[in-house]
Amino acid sequence: MSLPAAPIDYAKLAANIKRWAREFGFADAGITDIDLGDAAEGLRAFLAAGHHGDMHWLDERAHLRTHPDELHPGTLRVISLRMDYAPPDIKNAWDVLRDDGRAYISRYSLGRDYHRMIRRRLQRFADHIQSSIGHFGYRVFCDSAPIMEKPLAQKAGLGWRGKHTLTLSRSGGSYFFLGEILTDLPLPIDAPVPNHCGSCTRCIDICPTAAIIAPYKLDARRCITYLNIEHKGSIDPELRPLMGNRIFGCDDCQLICPWNKYAKVTVEPDFASRHGLDHARLIDLFGWNEATYLDKTEGMALRRAGHESWLRNIAIALGNAAYAQAVVDALNTRLDHPSEVVREHVQWALAQQEEKRRKANGILP
């Protein structure tokens, strides 16, 4: 006759989960309930204003985002986890931004795609919990389903909502990925942490396209990250000069944030920069055909843009660069590209280069 299982000490289990999280390579962990009422109100306002642009999936699955128990039935708690990604040379990002001959790629996307890596780590972590307490209901996520990761992390005490809308941690800044384990375990929950942005507005002031329209409010339609990753097709000519040399994502609001002096450098080799993309030349990247692009970006979040948008984004950056015959020559190689979108942006870039040539030579309009 088997003995009944001992009751679970959920307070002790919660403490163990946080300790085990660090053993599995996570920087921090917190636990929260699934009440997203406040976040749901903010999401509705964001969608009603049209600030989501072409990201229609946000609207289509809005209800699911705010009800984790419908995403995974039986969910009572969310274990929110943080994994740091800041590279050792994060401060050198400014040097790349100031060099208009180089391509700026958001620091989070220079290495291996974090989605799969973190999901696998979360699965192993959940397996470990199960080996310790027996079967329990759960499901793991990492930016892979309609789930409000940032509000859940903030409720779980991993940080507060910065004025740029990213999650900020006193011990880790904002250079981190989030992952979740939705579970039916009735664990004790953690308290949110206070907001420590104070009167600082550096992230708002530095945004190249004024996409942060007010503290804690972002209009994605103006956000460079949205424009060069999520948005397909033509980019508003008025916004193109403001994009500078940023060809995939934008980190300005993070680079300027005082709290990122506390960001932890990653120890994960998967997050290390590949193919010299942390300081690559625009002309070199513009020369990649689709086969090269697919080969070089294999297993990377960078592939999300697609080759057409890749060329579109680089064409804009080349148009924003100082005049150089080498830039003009590179752009001319794509004038007959099959994509109308690519051709349009190449023609715009060539016009920008010609205007700069004329000004440099003192030729009046």
Image (cartoon, grey):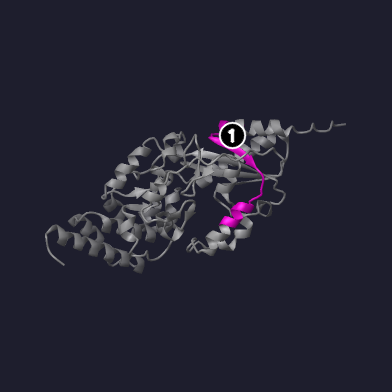
Instruction: Kindly identify the residue that appears in the image at 34 percent across and 48 percent down.
Output: 104
* 130 shown above or below 338: above
Image location of residue 39, percent across then percent down = 59, 52
Q: Is residue 24 left or right of residue 267?
A: right
Q: Magenta region: which residues? A: 20-42
- Circle 1: residue type: Ala
Report if residue 97 is visible in the image.
Answer: yes
For the residue pair 171 and 10, the one nearer the viewer reads as 171
- SS of the residue under disc 1: helix
Residue at the far left: name it: 362
Q: Position of residue 180 (x, y in %)?
A: 60, 44
Residue 33 percent across, percent down from the top left: 67, 45
Q: The N terminus is located in which quarter? A: top right
In the image, 338 versus 280, the foreground residue is: 280
Which quarter of the picture shows residue 257? top left
Residue 26 among magenta residues? yes
**Residue closer to the observer: 199 or 4:** 199
- Residue 112, x across and y down, in percent: 45, 44
Q: Which residue is mark 1?
A: 21
Residue 332 can be seen in this image: no
The residue furthest right is 1
